[in-house]
Image (cartoon, helix red, strand yellow):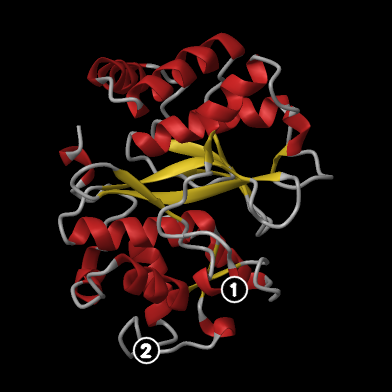
Amino acid sequence: MVDRYRSQSAYSDPGPYAALLAHLPTDVPGLVGVVRNVIVHYYAQGLSFSGERLAEVDSRWVARILAADRSRHTRPLGAPREPKTRVVGCARDLTLLTVAALRHRGVAARSRIGFAGYFGDAFHYDHVVTEYWNGERWVRVDAQLDPATTDFDTFDVRHFITAAEAWTAHRRDEIDPDNYGADPVGPFRGHRFLLDQVRHELAHRQRDELLLWDEWGAVDEDLADWVAERLLAADAGSVEAEEELASRYAADPALHPGGRVHCVSPSGLDAWVDV
């Protein structure tokens, strides 16, 4: 199952910009440093964007992210960029570009959907991290964080909580679901948010690295339980669980987005989008 993550997906494929990835650092810290030089979070770094710049959060495909970078820069991706001129994105985009660069070198890599409780308060924010195969195990990397500002290893993150783990803990009454979501005070948290994140985790595991604000299908609690149970089993090494997930995902429109998603974005976009 590792080998399926060595090749590009439709979302991670750099297309005509593949040559830009060929000269990136081969070490993970160096690579992530370049990724953070290319993409700036749409709010977490204290900058504000609007209009066409904010709309870059919906770039969706690595090829489009790199096209946006090329529209403002002609130098290599590692050449310093002022934060305001970087491509506007979020954790999903930082992760996807990291995944694309690793896959370009034949390294198995994938994005993981879940929650981070390490952003400075007690809330668990929805988050995306990179996971790559080091030859012995899957290693999680938080590409969004500056390693100089954290008190843990961002290149081997041990306390990221997957969506399946959070949903399962919620169903066992082990956590407060309202402490998990997009922010502590808004509507995007709690039971329904956790349920939807299980579907997103499965989509990313199946190499459909959709935007965090994409919507599709209709997952109920029983289906979320089924998916979460197998995601946890797959993480524990079950090939059977991996195969069951892949088969159900391909066949069930509640899980698979098909050719369209409803995108409700912080950019203001609220529309059905062909993917």
The quarter of the picture where residue 174 lies is top right
Secondary structure beneath dot 1 equals: helix
Crowding near the residue tagged with mark 2, few <14, some 14–19, many ≥20 C-alpha atoms within 10 Å: few
Q: Residue at x 15, y 55 (%)?
A: 106
Give the residue pinned by disc 2.
79
Give the class, few, some or many, for how many residues have Cα within 10 Å of label 1's Cα (few <14, many ≥20). Answer: some
Depth check: 75 or 108 in front? 108
Please state if 85 lies on the left or on the right of 111 as rendered. right
Q: Amino acid at mark 2?
A: Ala
**Residue drawn at the location 34% of the way across and 20% of the way down:** 245
Q: Position of residue 107 (x, y in %)?
A: 19, 54
Identify the residue shown where x is 57% and y is 20%.
168
Q: Is residue 112 above or below residue 217?
A: below
Q: Image quarter for residue 136?
A: top left
Disc on res. 53: 1
Q: Residue at 84% x, 45% y: name it.
A: 185
